[in-house]
Amino acid sequence: MAAAKTMNARDAVSGALAECYVTIAGKRYRFMQLINFQSGVTKEKSEVPILGRTGKGHKSSNWKGSFKGLAHYNQSVLRQLLLDYKNNGEDLYFDIQVTNDDPGSAVGRQTIVHKGCNINGGTLARFDANADFLDETIEGTFDDWEMPEKFRLLEGM
């Protein structure tokens, strides 16, 4: 029996080799403050009763996107969005583009563009006399997404 093909360790994608850009009202920011970021989609499903079966089926009926991350506390761009909302009720939506690109991995690059992002809230002010540095949590939702670049399949997959 032939040995099963396995992934090469070098093909694991580095967690630090990524880029993140935020585009707000036509202005693009390189969001290098992020320490970590994760986005995801949750599918909502409806139960489907089916005649002749004792169990119900499930059909996807909707999805919702959300993101969360941890960032160094050293930018006011997102706080300005909260201030604008407080002052004039204008809730600005924006895009977040994340590209993973580890040149040592055979998988290449993947880019996800999150469209219609909206933050849930945020830190206004912070200090900690014991901290080596300050960070803040960033959370929100998105309404759409695209994947203009996809990882290549590894040999043997």
Image (cartoon, rainbow, N blue to C red):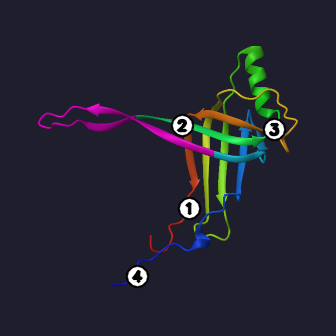
Q: Could you tell me if the residues under marks 2 and 1 are in contact, i.e. CB atoms within 8 Å?
A: no
Quickly name the residue at label 1. Answer: 151
Magenta run includes residue 51: yes
Q: Residue at x 71, y 48 (%)?
A: 20
Could you tell me residue 114's position as x and y percent? 61, 41
Residue placed at 54% from the left, 43% from the top?
40
Q: Earlier in the sequence, mark 4 or mark 1?
A: 4
Q: Is residue 78 magenta?
A: no
Which disc, if any, is residue 92? none
Q: CA distance from mark 1 to mark 3?
A: 31 Å
Q: Please state which amino acid type lies under the numbered disc 3.
A: Tyr
Q: Which numbered circle lies on residue 3?
A: 4
Q: Do tag 3 and tag 2 residues touch (Cβ < 8 Å)?
A: no
Going from the N terminus, do you reach mark 3 or mark 2 first? 2
Q: Which residue is mark 2?
A: 65
Mark drawn on residue 73: 3
Closer to viewer: mark 3 or mark 2: 3
Q: Looking at the image, is mark 1 or mark 3 earlier in the sequence? A: 3
Seen as rendered, the residue at the extreme left is: 52
Q: Are marks 3 and 4 in contact (CB under 8 Å)?
A: no
Q: Residue furthest front?
A: 130
Q: Which residues are magenta?
A: 38-61
Which amino acid, mark 4?
A: Ala
Q: Secondary structure at mark 3?
A: loop
Of marks 4 and 1, the one in the foreground = 4
Instruction: State the separation of the CA atoms marked 3 and 2.
Output: 25 Å
Residue type, mark 2 in image: Gly
Query: Of all residues shown, which one is farthest toward the bottom?
Result: 1
Q: Secondary structure at mark 1?
A: loop
Kind of element beneath mark 2: strand
Q: Is residue 106 visible?
A: no
